[in-house]
Amino acid sequence: MIRMQPSVESAQSVAESDAVAVKRTLAGERDAYRILVERHSHHVFRLAYRMTRNQHDAEEVVQEAFLRAYQKLGQFAARANFGTWVYRIAANYAIDRMRQRKKEEARKVEPAAGEEGMESDPVSLVQDAAPTPERLTQSLELRKQMEIALAALSDSERTAFVMRHWEGCGIEEIAAVLKSNSGAAKNTVFRAVQKLRLALQPFVGRGTQARAMGTEP
Amino acid sequence: MKHMTEEELIAYREGVAAERAGIAEHLAACEECRAELEKIEAVLAALDTLPVPDPGDDYGRRVWQHIAPRLPEKRVRWWQTWFEPKQLVAVGAIAALLVAAFLAGRISRHDRTPDVIANKEQVRERVLVVAVGEHLGRSEMMLVELSNAEPIDPAQKHVNIASEQRRAEDLLEENRLYRQTALQEGDTGLANVLDDLERVLLDVAHSPDNVTPAQLEKIRQKIEAQGILFKVRVVSKDLQERQKATNPAPAQNNSPQKERNKV
């Protein structure tokens, strides 16, 4: 699991420095906002990419998140952490972007009769799309299956999984983004992992077997 | 023995289980549940190998360049910024200059004829001219030192510019105040140069403590590209001229000592 774990001291000094930059921005120093943008862009990009699985969309999410944060800066509570706040704005916008993307794709490809509801069934998606092992290496195949399995999660599930598993966010924070309570947020994390497991375990097992046999590069 | 459910194992693995200690105890004793947890972990570990593209070191800068033109100005009264805690230091310095100018005027008032006593406007401008002149001198010195910075030990791969960085931070605070004051006074020429200087100071203040020779070269190029040293020198010269012009004319009954000093 990849999580950013800055020391308590450095996290505190960053938060203090952020608070000063926020105050200056609110006082009319637009350039002070640049410090916040440059400091948090990479972090927000990582979240946005993991949620959208698309670099172009992720970059759009980052820009929009900082624009929205600037516009709402007056509502930002000085005691809160700017990084966490902009992160939440980005997660919300990423959810909007993912929904928008799905609508665009749905318009491009009209689903055939009886295909409704397939999206929530990652196992069927994975099996349908599974290439033959002869055509691809095990690792490439697994990667493709992982992309498919993640794409098959609902927006809420993917958001909850990305925020909890990869970004190490607290359940309360995830609940705030999903506009639900902590119990529901925990349940969403569980459903996401369960679906991913169901979709990927056969491929992970195969990969493990291939490694054991020395056939995987 | 009652086994753990999948939900409990996932919650345990993702660190959101309420009964962590109880699950850990059970896992220590139950091989079947441990094997189940390992399967979950294998899937999650595989997912962790999915790459995230690196947007590059200058990504933050690029994001700023994209959004900066779209950010509306936040309207605040100019004097509000003077009461920011960090800026109070610079405000204090200016206030001290004003007091000094006032006292100097009171002390020398008896020696002057009424037509040579500087009026309030002149005193104010003189104070600004002196303070900004000193500020520009300090900025120039810092930028020249930064341009000539080299590693202490030639074998070192990095150049430490922490000292210049701290000075740039302090100068940045003063610079903002002088720029705002120049704008209030309608001195747009001075305000523009201070604005250019502010951008350079901002870059230096936000550079890392230790820079590679390549990074330092970039900073130097930026300083040169903006011609900031030249602009600073021209404005400093102009301010010196203004300082002379705003100084009161020498009194007619100068003492011999003053006459000697003039030579």
Image (spheres, rainbow, N blue to C red):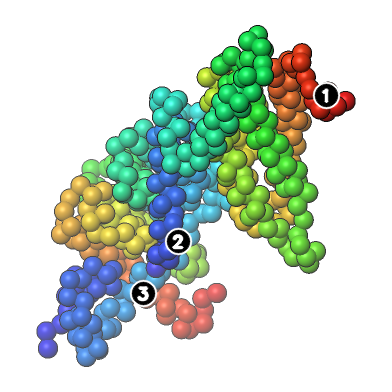
Evaluate whether residue A161 shows in this view: no
User: Which mark is first along the chain, 3 or 1?
Assistant: 3
Q: Are marks 2 and 3 on the same chain?
A: no
Task: Give the foreground label among 1 and 2.
Answer: 1
Task: Provide residue B236's location: percent of width, then percent of height.
Answer: 73, 28
Residue holding disc 2: A10
| Cβ–Cβ under 8 Å for marks 2 and 3 | no
SS under mark 2: helix
For residue B101, which numbered disc appears in the image? none
> Label 2 marks which chain's residue?
A
Quarter that holds the N terminus of chain B: bottom left
The structure residue drawn at horizontal position 29% and vertical position 37%, both measured from the top left corner, is: A75
Decide which of B40, B236 is in the foreground and name it: B236
Task: Provide residue B142's location: percent of width, then percent of height.
Answer: 70, 44
SS under mark 3: helix
Decide which of A46, B90 is in the foreground and name it: B90
The reply, left or right, for residue A16 in relation to residue B20 is right
Evaluate whether residue A201 shows in this view: yes
Which amino acid, mark 2? Ser
Relative to A32, is A195 above or below? below
Which amino acid, mark 3? Ala
The structure residue drawn at horizontal position 71% and vertical position 36%, both measured from the top left corner, is: B137
Task: Give the foreground label among 1 and 3.
Answer: 1
- Distance CA(mark 1)–CA(mark 2): 64 Å
Residue holding disc 1: B256
Residue holding disc 3: B42
- Distance CA(mark 2)–CA(mark 3): 33 Å
Number of numbered tags placed on the structure image = 3
